[in-house]
Image: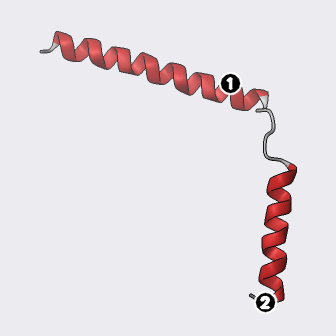
């Protein structure tokens, strides 16, 4: 391994160790909740429609 590869692997390890976990932003939480809610609603609609059309 040459010097640049050693430096890059050290830098990657340092960056990963610094911020392994951070809180989600409010916008991210809102997007997650909207997509989860939309997925559940659409699944319920599909189940109802396919049971009625059966």
Q: Which residue is mark 2?
A: 2
Callout 1 crowding tier (Cα within 10 Å): few <14, some 14–19, many ≥20: few
Q: How is the image coloured?
A: secondary structure
Q: What residue lies at 21% left-to-right and 17% top-to-bottom?
A: 50
Horizontal side of residue 24 vs 34, given as left or right: right
Q: Is residue 17 above or below residue 2?
A: above
Q: Is residue 44 above or below residue 21?
A: above
Q: What residue lies at 77% left-to-right and 81% top-to-bottom?
A: 5
User: On the rendered image, what quadrant is the N terminus found in?
Assistant: bottom right
Quadrant hosting residue 11: bottom right
Q: Nearer the viewer, residue 13 or 30?
A: 13
Q: Which residue is mark 1?
A: 30
> Could you tell which of marks 1 and 2 lies nearer the N-terminus?
2
Q: Is residue 48 above or below residue 13?
A: above
> Seen from this angle, which residue lies furthest front?
1
User: On the rendered image, what quadrant is the C terminus found in?
Assistant: top left
Q: What residue lies at 80% left-to-right and 33% top-to-bottom?
A: 23
Tag count in the figure?
A: 2
What is the x, y in percent for residue 19? Answer: 84, 47
């Amino acid at each position: 391994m040459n010097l640049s590869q050693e430096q890059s692997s050290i830098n990657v390890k340092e960056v990963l160790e610094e911020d392994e976990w951070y809180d989600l932003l409010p916008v991210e939480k809102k997007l997650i909740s909207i997509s989860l809610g939309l997925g559940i609603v659409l699944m319920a609609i599909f189940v109802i429609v396919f049971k009625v059309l059966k």
